[in-house]
Image (cartoon, grey):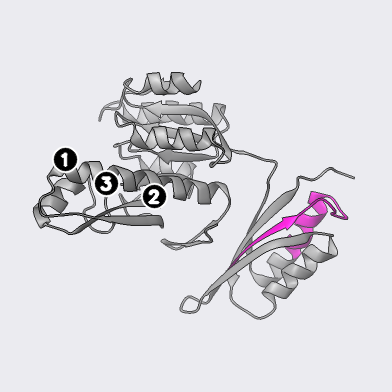
Amino acid sequence: MTEFPQTSTLLVSCPDRRGIVAALAQVLHGHGANILDSDQHTDTEAGVFFQRICFDTRELLSDRTSLERAIDEVAERMGMRFQLSDSSTRKRLAIFVSRTDHCLYDLLLRQRAGELRCDIPLIVSNHPDLKPVADQFGIDFEVFPISADNKPAQERRELERLEAHGIDVIALARYMQVLSGDFVEHYPARIINIHHSFLPAFSGGRPYQQARERGVKLIGATAHYATLDLDEGPIIEQDVIRTSHRDSVADLTRKGRDVERSVLSHAVRWHLEDRVLVYGNKTVVFPG
């Protein structure tokens, strides 16, 4: 019999109806899976059901193909979309950066400490400034200078390198470049951007200046999936920090960096652990 990893995670979404939980539990139990954790949510207005199930696979009575086929039968009957992942498969993360290093360092240190269960084989930048950071961690660093004239060609080269490294998910760690629609469509709901504002307030490139001019008492950060619409993708995580009328733009930037680090790392971790489901322009997040 095929040797299974210790755990698997099943993410599902479908039109809400009776019997979904029982049907999935019956399939898993029938194949010898032991459910370790289950969380669910129903959007009553949209009539959509969501569930995340983590289960022990050490005593499965069948192989993965048979299990997936059985889940697929339930999915077809329920109009369900599902994703099944194994704990033995580590996702491969690429990090895109420009010249700012705080989010990059945070992700690399968390990955080294085991907080982010993934491999990071590649860092991409439009400037060479942060190559010493990549060298420090033993990670390939590739520079693709971007201009209005060369952007399509450079993005094609970037996509080639991502494919060569087998990248599953991308973190835009203050990349400060707008990705084209063609690029985004290659990684739907797999490009996580950190925006240095509590969206939808102060979108665009100068949110701390805008916040200072407006005299806000809270600033924040937002991690969201990149879409064709700038700063309008499905939000994964947000947080805020209090400010004062005495704060300069530099003070706001310093305070905001702490929030940016934690918000981006939470979003990346939840994606890596298969805790996020996207529907429409919203997400359901099962934090852990």
Q: Secondary structure at mark 3?
A: helix
Q: Secondary structure at mark 1?
A: helix
Check disc 2 and give the amino acid type: Val
Give the quarter of the image for residue 23: bottom right
> Which residue is identified by label 1?
250
> Which residue is identified by label 3?
256
Q: Is residue 70 magenta?
A: yes
Q: What percent of the width, then of the height, locates residue 128?
A: 33, 20
Inspect this view and state whether residue 206 appears: no
> Which residue is identified by label 2?
263
Check disc 3 and give the amino acid type: Gly
Region rendered in magenta: 49-73
Residue contact at pointers 3 and 1, CB within 8 angstroms: no
Could you tell whether 270 is left or right of 239 in the image?
right
Q: State the CA–CA distance, disc 2 to disc 1.
A: 20 Å
Q: State the CA–CA distance, disc 3 to disc 2.
A: 11 Å
Residue at screen point 48% across, 50% down: 189
Q: Nearer the viewer, residue 71 or 267?
A: 267
Mark 3: give few (<14), some (14-19) or many (20+) Cα within 10 Å.
many
Q: Nearer the viewer, residue 236 or 35?
A: 35
